[in-house]
Amino acid sequence: MKLRFDSDQWEEIFSSLARNKTRTFLTAFGIFWGVFMLLLLMGGGRGLESTLANNFAGFANNSGFMMSAPTSEAYKGFKKGRMWSIETRDVQLIRSSVPELEIVSPTISNWRGSAAYGTNKSSVTVKGEYPDVDKIDDPKIRAGRGLNDVDVNKARKVCTIGSRIVEELFTTDENALGKFIIIDGIHYQVVGISGKSEGGVSIGGNATTTVHIPYTTMQHAYNRGNKVDVLCLTAREGYKMSDIQKKVEAVVKRIHTIHPDDTQAILTVNAEAIFSMIDTLFQGVSILVWLIGLGTLFSGAIGVSNIMVVTVKERTTEIGIRRAIGATPTDILMMIMSESIVLTFVAGMSGMTFAVMVLNLVEHGLADDTSGATFQISFFIAIGAATLLALLGVLAGLAPTIRALAIKPVDAIRDE
């Protein structure tokens, strides 16, 4: 079928659509609203997903965490409700007993710490860590350096601090680096500044108000002995944390004489399961967005088809005359289909343009936010939407076209 678009044909298309402006506008608005809502929902979903992705960035999705809790069952002479703690000696035993683990790292914390520099003060969380914890929860050091093995081995009094602590104690990052601050009565040198935002995911508290010091330094400074607050774990590639945690629990229960069936003595958090749940949630949201958007879009396409049916009915005599004076079925086909495609495409592209403008305004409005959300739709989604519009335009005009071709010239001329 050869497509012929000339000025007379375009004039005829717009003249036909302009005969009933209200009906054409309402029908076009159905397509406009369908495309607008589809792209707006997709852009909003992408923005939400990118916000969470940025918040989760740097946090290992194959990680797990373990803490001690009172026992819930009596076992081998020990009473129910016994208090116990994970200890530093457990770390090496777990590493040797569970080879599927990549990182086994203990952490200890003081959630009611205070930091001071001169007359400035800040409430902080103090965390004692080994450097390998950075592979689980990346501090995103924006200035200076993170903690290293030498700091731990020599129990150095050094620290890295969050962005809010810098704001409350110093004027700029450069002023903070190398300075000595007082944390709970002890002087520590600032060697690094974390770039993690307040909304990000972190172990044991707000990253912007957290001070990280070497694990051995905190053991001595706070007289913590061998007790561990949180045991951080990551699985090697090809293994699931949900399976490995059960093995780790069995080892810990054996070491500390805990009943094998005690489900409350060890508190566990499986980040891998949480990330999997979030992925599933976004897949569901994406499917819902497509269902709502496409449903609205197809409703608009049905409206276009209906208006074209009415148009064919109103122009029955005209179609008969055209057929009588030599118009071919292809000419009638192009006449009806062109009107349907033009109406669908113009309304759809208007909806797409408006959606992109709204998403752009939202993205610029959040430009100063630290979430780093991206709301704009991708180029391939735009191409897909344009292709879908063209397809809907063809489908919307198909039924009216078949009806028009079925009209015999004599019957059409007689139609009142």
Image: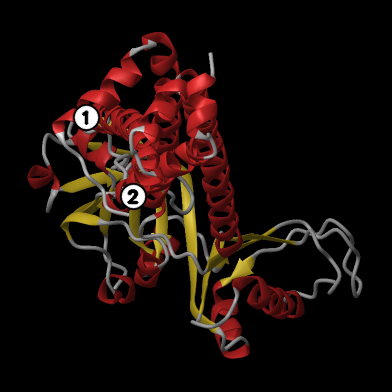
Left or right for 28, reference 182: right
Its colouring scheme is secondary structure
- The residue lying at 34 percent from left, 70 percent from top is 131
What amino acid is labelled 1 in the image? Trp
- The residue lying at 42 percent from left, 47 percent from top is 391
Q: Quadrant of residue 17?
A: top left
> Where in the figure is residue 299, as x and y percent of width and height?
55, 31
> Where in the figure is residue 80, as x and y percent of width and height?
88, 59
Between the residue at mark 1 and the residue at mark 2, the CA separation in whole angstroms equals: 70 Å
Q: Is residue 150 visible?
A: yes
Foreground residue among 33 and 182: 33
Task: Provide the secondary structure element on which disc 1 rests.
Answer: helix
User: Pointer 1: residues within 10 angstroms few (<14), some, or many (20+)?
Assistant: some
Task: Provide the secondary structure element on which disc 2 rests.
Answer: strand
Left or right for 117, reference 21: left
Foreground residue among 177 and 402: 402
* Number of marks in picture: 2
Name the quarter where the N terminus is drawn: bottom left
Q: Quadrant of residue 242?
A: bottom right
Q: Quadrant of residue 247?
A: bottom right
**Residues at circles 1 and 2 in contact by the CB criterion of under 8 Å:** no
Q: Which residue is mark 2?
A: 211
- On screen, 259 above or below 382? below
Foreground residue among 390 and 95: 390
User: Pointer 2: residues within 10 angstroms few (<14), some, or many (20+)?
Assistant: many
Task: Single out the mark in the foreground, 1 or 2.
Answer: 1
What amino acid is labelled 2 in the image? Val
The mark that comes first in sequence, 1 or 2, is 1
- The residue lying at 69 percent from left, 75 percent from top is 252
Q: Which residue is mark 1?
A: 10
> Where in the figure is residue 47, as x and y percent of width and height?
37, 41
